[in-house]
Amino acid sequence: MRIEYNCDLSGRNTFRMKVRCACFVEYGSVAELAALDWASLPKPWKHIGGGSNLLFTGDFPGTILHSAIKYVKYVDMGLDEVPVVVGAGVCWDELVAELCGHGLWGAENLSLIPGEVGAAAVQNIGAYGVEFKDIVSGVSCFDLQEMKPCKFSVAECGYGYRESMFKEAGGRYVITSVLLRLSRSPRPRLEYKGLAGVDASSPMAVREGVIGIRRGKLPDPEELGSAGSFFKNPVITAEAFVRVCNAAPGVTVPHFVLDGGMIKVPAAWLIDQCGFKGEREGGAAVYEKQPLVIVNATGNASPEDVLELERRIVATVHERFGVALSPEVEHL
């Protein structure tokens, strides 16, 4: 157990915002979490993972909680499906590398996504046609309202596009572990256009292909501070899509038709069409290779720089296309 007051969080968020919290708590087990003197911890309480999907908009006045529960347990019964129990503090990409190394299919498309397992379960991370919900069976939590452990099936988690019941619950549940289900049988998911030509001979081959694609488009958070994809891809009606097309005459608008007739339009395309690629605001900038990403270009960007750039992007896209962009990155 580690408890630190007036803690520097600059190394706890991949945007590298220079902010502090009133209290920081890191625990290594469910028992340690349950044994905390909660009444003494400054409120609000907020649980974070690797800080890869966060924008701290200033110093945090309460307690930041972080899991150091790190284990991977295989329930191998010799069947095609292999259940795997994983602690919430495990690095997500290290887990994917391990699963692929064991020849298990299911997580390979989610390679190189930063963050930790617990946060992946909250965010329902996704990439290249696969989401976290596709490989999870259940989630174990600690209920901060009832102050006791609890479990949820995948159906109870309320997963949607970058959404889950855990987000809606407002921090009530702290995820402590997840139960994943992987497959020994080859199950490559290469329907996504960007994966055309990727070697599907093994999970590791697909992983390497995905990593190559991601590295060509996204900044390495170790080298350039960011929170990955900053905006969600908007899902709009067919009528709204016609308006988007009319706002870009002579241009083919990339899109994906969803069940029910709604249409998903890439936020990156909308932002690029508005000329924001490489645009700066103070120390923040839109990444030159991928306009969906806002970066801490100087290493000294302030939260205000990022927020102002976000505001400008949202306003301009709405003015031109009539589409409201929503941030994928959580603001604290």
Image (cartoon, grey):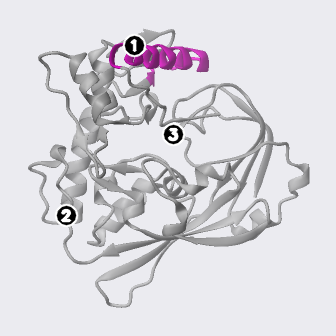
Q: Circle 2 sits on which residue? A: 188
x, y (%) of residue 317? Answer: 38, 18
Which amino acid type is marked by label 1? Glu
Q: Residue furthest front?
A: 239
- Give the alpha-carbon distance from disc 1 to disc 2, as whole Å: 40 Å
User: Could you tell me which secondary element the residue under label 2 belongs to?
Assistant: loop
90 to 9, vertically: above or below: below
Which amino acid type is marked by label 2? Pro
Quarter holding residue 187? bottom left
Q: Is residue 302 magenta?
A: yes
290 to 74, vertically: above or below: above
User: Could you tell me which secondary element the residue under label 3 belongs to?
Assistant: loop
Q: Is residue 302 left or right of residue 320?
A: right
Quarter holding residue 319? top left
Of the 4 image quadrants, the one containing the N terminus is bottom right
Dots 1 and 2: beta carbons under 8 Å?
no
Instruction: Point out the tag, 1 or 2, that comes first from the N-terminus.
Output: 2
77 to 263, vertically: above or below: below
Depth order, front residue of 191/324: 324
Q: Which residues are magenta?
A: 295-321
Q: Is residue 19 left or right of residue 70?
A: right
**Label 2 neighbour load within 10 Å: few <14, some 14-19, many 20+:** some
Principal secondary structure, stretch drawn in magenta: helix
x, y (%) of residue 56? Answer: 63, 30
Residue displayed at 28% across by 84% down: 80
